[in-house]
Image (cartoon, grey):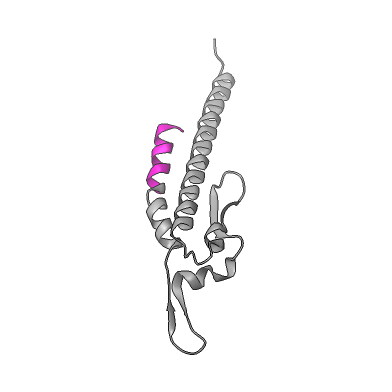
Amino acid sequence: MTTINQLAQEIVRAVKAYTDDVSDAIETRVDEVAELVRADVEANAPKRTGKYAKGFKVTKQGSSGKAKRVVWNKKKSRIVHLNEFGYAKRGGGRVAGRPHLRPAYDRHAANLPDDIKRIIRNGG
């Protein structure tokens, strides 16, 4: 015979197992997408010397349970926006931007909400 307390404990265990599986699967998928974005940015970034393109890294941010990743340039972070959007020259005129970060994000992260919904529906 099962008591109410035992039934409650089993329900809590099942919900915790489901939550842990879903959290792990979401974090894994976010890591995969962040790496795809980083690789795409590296492939499409301006390559005068190649140092700029090789400087992109993925960093985890946030507390546990929140899968947040940031793709950034570790070596030349101060010039990413200049390459992305362009800038005015000192003597007049403009240097055209070479969008590489936003297009990579749009290509790979656009389906992430649907992937997360599917993970939650399937239980991990």
- Residue 79 sits above or below residue 124 on the image: below
Membership of 120 in magenta stretch: yes
Membership of 123 in magenta stretch: yes
- Residue 108 sits above or below residue 45 on the image: above
- Residue 112 sits above or below residue 42 on the image: above
Q: Nearer the viewer, residue 44 or 3?
A: 44
Residue 82: x %, y % from top left: 50, 73
User: Furthest residue to the top?
Assistant: 1
Residue drawn at x 40%, y 42% is 115
User: Furthest residue to the front?
Assistant: 49
Residue drawn at x 53%, y 61% is 50
Residue 30: x %, y % from top left: 49, 45
Residue drawn at x 59%, y 66% is 76
Magenta residues span 113-124
Residue 26: x %, y % from top left: 49, 41
Q: Nearer the viewer, residue 23 or 91?
A: 91
Quadrant housing the N terminus: top right
